[in-house]
Image: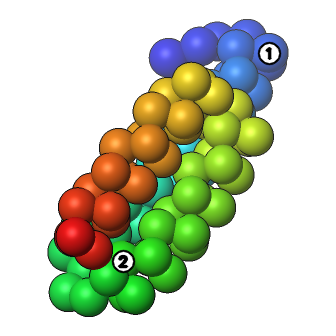
């Protein structure tokens, strides 16, 4: 446990950021899962656009790397197209 003022503040900030990052990553996983479990191609397409939006926001905030975001979106698009065929 820190004894000085600035490390105490850093501890508080880290906890707050960790909670925020965890929430956003969870949202990304949930949106991705909606694409994979979609029953119809139309539903998959709608879920894909929402998931892409969530992933892009996470990348913009710096929670995930932009290349990771691109890879996730590409993988989801492949799954959505496979369900359509």
Q: Which x, y percent locates residue 22? A: 46, 47
Q: Tag count in the figure?
A: 2
Q: Is residue 40 above or below residue 84?
A: below
Q: Residue 6, labelled with which disc?
A: 1
The structure residue drawn at horizontal position 40% and vertical position 87%, both measured from the top left corner, is 42
Considering depth in this image, is 9 or 48 the residue closer to the camera? 48
Query: For the residues carrying marks 2 and 1, which lies nearer the camera in this image?
Result: 2
The structure residue drawn at horizontal position 23% and vertical position 61%, both measured from the top left corner, is 82
Q: Which x, y percent locates residue 21? A: 55, 43
Secondary structure under tag 2 reads helix
Q: Give the residue pinned by disc 2.
A: 44
Q: How is the image coloured?
A: rainbow
Secondary structure under tag 1 reads helix
The structure residue drawn at horizontal position 50% and vertical position 17%, both measured from the top left corner, is 1
Q: Crowding at label 2, few (<14), some or many (≥20) Cα neighbours within 10 Å? A: many
Q: Which x, y percent locates residue 48? A: 47, 67
The structure residue drawn at horizontal position 26% and vertical position 88%, both measured from the top left corner, is 40
- Residue 34 shows in the view: no
Outermost residue toward the right? 6
Q: Is residue 1 above or below residue 41?
A: above
Q: Is residue 56 above or below residue 18?
A: below
Outermost residue toward the front? 85
Q: Which x, y percent locates residue 84? A: 27, 74
Considering depth in this image, is 81 or 73 the residue closer to the camera? 81
Quadrant of the snapshot with the C terminus:
bottom left
Q: Crowding at label 1, few (<14), some or many (≥20) Cα neighbours within 10 Å? A: few
């Amino acid at each position: 446990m820190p004894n000085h003022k600035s490390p105490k503040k850093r501890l508080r900030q880290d906890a707050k950021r960790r909670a925020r990052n965890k929430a956003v990553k969870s949202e990304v996983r949930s949106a991705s899962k909606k694409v994979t479990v979609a029953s119809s191609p139309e539903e998959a397409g709608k879920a894909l656009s929402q998931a892409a939006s969530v992933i892009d926001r996470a990348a913009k905030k710096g929670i995930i790397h932009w290349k990771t975001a691109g890879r996730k979106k590409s993988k989801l698009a492949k799954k959505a197209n496979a369900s359509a065929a």
